[in-house]
Image (spheres, rainbow, N blue to C red):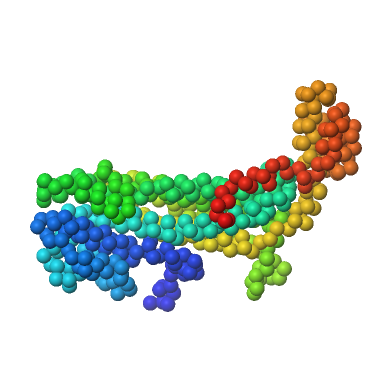
Amino acid sequence: MSPLSTQPLSPLDGRYQQQVSALGEHLSEAGLNRARIQVEVEWIIHLTDREMFGARRLAPEEQRQLRQLVTEFDDDDIADLARREAVTRHDVKAVEYVVRDRLTALGLTEIAELTHFACTSEDINNLAYAITIRAAVRDVWLPKVHSVVEALRQQALALRDVPMLAHTHGQPATPTTMGKELAVVVHRLELLLATVDEVEYRGKFSGATGTFSAHLAADPDHDWISASRDFVTGLGLTWNPLTTQIESHDWQAQLYQRISHVGRVLHNLCTDVWSYISMGYFRQIPQEGATGSSTMPHKINPIRFENAEANLELASALLDSLAATLVTSRLQRDLTDSTTQRNIGVALGHSLLALDNIEKGLGEIAIDEAALGRDLDANWEVLGEAIQTVIRAEVTAGRSSIADPYAMLKELTRGNRVGADELREFIDGLDISPEAKARLRELTPSTYTGAASQLVDFIDTTGSE
């Protein structure tokens, strides 16, 4: 066998493994199997706590030893499960045998038949996926994206008063401030992340076709519907009472669409910051030992934002595919979701890698106020909007008889470079009140930023306290 054939196929497991390894704790095959064991063990404890079918209640120490299958899950357990699955050719069955063996080792063979009792594999799988996805999102992905939002928040607050020539359609437009533009991104992300937090992680536990048929065959007098609800909610999940063999995955589709949307806003941030760097608005801080080009020594490439941009595209492609395909299952069950769901970690891995690059990239740029000032001073014609608007107000107030102020300013400024002296001479000749002329003469591109600085206050500043 060639040594290359054993190398990681995905860059997430090779080049970028360090940046995304935290997700492996939950969304790897091993993480999924640990969660499966957790569900199987908790179901046994649930049944014995209620002394189902005459089973005795397990002592606290017996419960603790049984739960050690989960709390002490390690490399030996991972290898053991792999060996068992190679024989069973069924992942959940391999998990069942591990649990049965632990019961035997603990001298609890009398309750061995409660292992996987009345369960279909999807009863175990859907809960295991809900547990692992919830942990990956809440414990790994969300803290990272909130860290990026906080870095943006600090930049927005620090740069709230730094004037900047805006560009609409790539052309000079009414000035803004860099802080206000970054605050727009913070605000968008805060609203979207609130919707991610709202997603309910749902689970079903109702047998082969969602009807509790086997349960009622075993004990027709037990309230299995309530038992299912109590068990699922006891795992911290939202109970879904109406399903086929599978939990319908609608919550997953909702979650992935919302995470993908967050990624698209971040993608927009990356392209804008890249553009600001190319325009000289941001300077890149040289990193010790780094090389920007193999032939051009002067270069510092905006690789953090380019890398993030590409990984966000990959993440959205996968997340969108997951959202689109997981909501469909032929009749009561098919296995397309089994393969699809194994890529959840890949999708979130690309997103997490992008977040890591954005956070680092934001720490490697600095505002160049001199460059911003030069650009503003070279575009006095952007004050045309202010002048024609003031004239229209003067006309309405009866202090001017100028006809069609917009056309007048269009003729003066459209496609033309107009300097400070020309504009002030133009203002002096206008038929408007002295007070209006004074206001307009005081305006410069750098001061024509409206309420931009004030608008930054609309972002949630609690994260900066």
27 up-or-down from 267: above or below = below
- In this orientation, does residue 101 appear? no
The residue under the point 37% across, 48% down is 200
The percent coordinates of residue 199 (x first, y second) are 40, 47
101 up-or-down from 315: above or below = below
- Image-based side of 442 in relation to 151, left or right: right
- Image-based side of 67 in relation to 20, left or right: left
The percent coordinates of residue 35 (x first, y second) are 31, 61
The residue under the point 14% across, 47% down is 222
Of 412 and 360, nearer the camera is: 360
Image quarter (top left, top right, bottom left or bottom right) of the N terminus: bottom left
The percent coordinates of residue 276 (x first, y second) are 68, 54
- In this orientation, does residue 134 appear? yes
Residue 295: name its quadrant.
bottom right
Of 54 and 416, nearer the camera is: 54
Check the image and name the residue furthest to the front.
Answer: 465
The residue under the point 77% across, 36% down is 386
The percent coordinates of residue 314 (x first, y second) are 49, 56
